[in-house]
Amino acid sequence: ADLSSANPRSGDLSCGDMRSAEISSADLSYADLSSADLRSADLSYADLSYADLSSAYLPSVDLSYADLRSVDLSSVDLRSAIFLSTDLRSTKTLTSQQLTSKNPPLLCNSPLPETIQIEGGMNRDCDRIAKVLTERYPGYFRFRSLESAEEFVAEQQKKTWD
């Protein structure tokens, strides 16, 4: 499914099957995505502020630059998810276990809540994320080569946070 730039704001998408969906730049603020299957979906640049993602299945999802203010992440599977320049400081119920379990999400320039301290911190995976981007998105204009993906990631690392 291609829901990029869609506006299902406040919609009920709970228990939905959106595997591998293109949902980048969509406005999903206040949406109910609880128990949704979003594995391998592209949610980059999506507005997920105040959304309910509790118990959602998000392995390998791309949450680069997503707005996650006050998102409920309780019991969310984040294995191998991508957090590139994603502010995680105001997420609700994010745990260090979600960030350090087997196949943890990839973190690069993604500030963490004050209550979470993990080895490597917000830049733990910057050295690995370019390779993952080129593998997951072959042919994507920004990542035509590993070198272009590395340049892109290096540029994202320059972003500063308040």
Image (tube, rainbow, N blue to C red):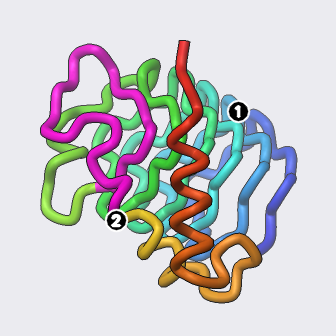
Residue 32: image location, x then y, percent = 60, 40
Residue at 31% of width from left, 32% of height from top?
94
134 in relation to 38, above or below: below
What amino acid does circle 2 point to? Answer: Arg
Task: Please identify the quarter of the rendering in which residue 132 is found.
Answer: bottom left
What amino acid does circle 1 point to? Answer: Ser
62 in relation to 117, above or below: below
Task: Please identify the quarter of the rendering in which residue 160 is found.
Answer: top right
99 in relation to 93, above or below: below
Residue stretch in magenta: 105-127
Badge 1 crowding class, 10 Å Cα cut-off, few under 14, some 14 to 19, many 20 or more, is: many
Residue 158: image location, x then y, percent = 56, 36
The residue that mark 2 highlights is 128
Q: What element does badge 2 sit on?
A: helix
Mark 1 vs mark 2, CA separation in Å: 30 Å
Mark sitting on residue 119: none
Badge 2 crowding class, 10 Å Cα cut-off, few under 14, some 14 to 19, many 20 or more, is: some
Inspect the magenta stretch and tell me whether residue 59 lies in it: no
Front position among marks 1 and 2: 2
Inspect the magenta stretch and tell me whether residue 118 lies in it: yes
Q: Main secondary structure of the magenta part?
A: loop
The residue that mark 1 highlights is 29
